[in-house]
Amino acid sequence: MTTLHDFTIKNIDGKATTLSNYKGKVVLIVNVASQCGYTPQYKGLETLYQAYKDKGLMILGFPSNDFGAQEPGSESQIKEFCSLKYGVTFDMFGKVKVKGGEKVDLYKYLTETTGSEVQWNFNKFLVDKEGKVAKYYSSSISPESSELIDDIEKLL
């Protein structure tokens, strides 16, 4: 696999989604969890999405239970939580492994490309319009951070 667009992965409703659907878009990929200290970043992610979606930004949320068992729910529970608590409208996917031997291929690609392993929930990968990984951000970089926003604006 050479770009984000080469992958197919199930969305939160269980439907196989070809990531080539995001060609020509700047994509922010985030591993998310409902019971984490960083969970309020959902609000910032949704605000960021609303501000930039019409300019070509897509946000993809990938629930993961890999860190502190902070995403124990089913896909339907996660979808309901995100919708009711944070009004999430950006694209959400099925629960995945983002570390270790069972890491999904998409996250193998992201971590091998950047040389950065996912350290905790709400790590972020910024991908350019051609599907190439541009940058990795730790959980402490919030969706409102000027660093992240500046990088997104450069790619748009």
Image (cartoon, helix red, strand yellow):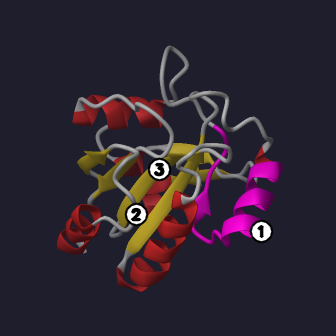
SS state under label 2: loop
Residue at the image position 31 percent from the left and 55 percent from the top: 127
| Magenta stretch: includes residue 94 | yes
Image x and y of residue 44, in percent: 48, 68
Q: For this view, does 40 lie left or right of residue 85? A: left
Residue drawn 57% across and 29% down? Answer: 67
The mark that comes first in sequence, 2 or 1, is 1
Camera-nearest residue between 25 and 155: 155
Counting residues from the N terminus, which is met first, the one under dot 3 or under dot 1?
Answer: 3
Q: Residues within 10 Å of mark 3 (few under 14, many from 20)?
A: many
- In the image, residue 106 above or below residue 108: below
Identify the image quadrant of residue 57.
bottom left
Gap between marks 3 and 1, in whole Å?
19 Å
Q: Position of residue 147 (x, y in %)?
A: 22, 62
Dividing the picture into quarters, in which one does residue 154 lie?
A: bottom left
Q: Are marks 2 and 1 in contact (CB under 8 Å)?
A: no
Q: Quadrant of the C terminus?
A: bottom left
| Residue 129 visible to the viewer | no
Whole-angstrom CA distance, mark 2 to mark 1, is 20 Å
Sequence-first disc among 2 and 3: 3
What distance separates the C-alpha of mark 2 from that of mark 3?
10 Å
Q: Is residue 16 above or below residue 68?
A: below
Indicate whether residue 96 is drawn in magenta.
no
The residue singled out by tag 2 in the image is 143
Whether residue 68 sits left or right of residue 107 in the image: it is right
Amino acid under label 1? Leu
In the rendered structure, which segment of residues is drawn in magenta?
76-95
Query: Which residue type does callout 3 highlight?
Result: Val
Query: What residue is disc 3 on?
Result: 30
Element under label 3? strand
> Which residue carries the number 1 mark?
84
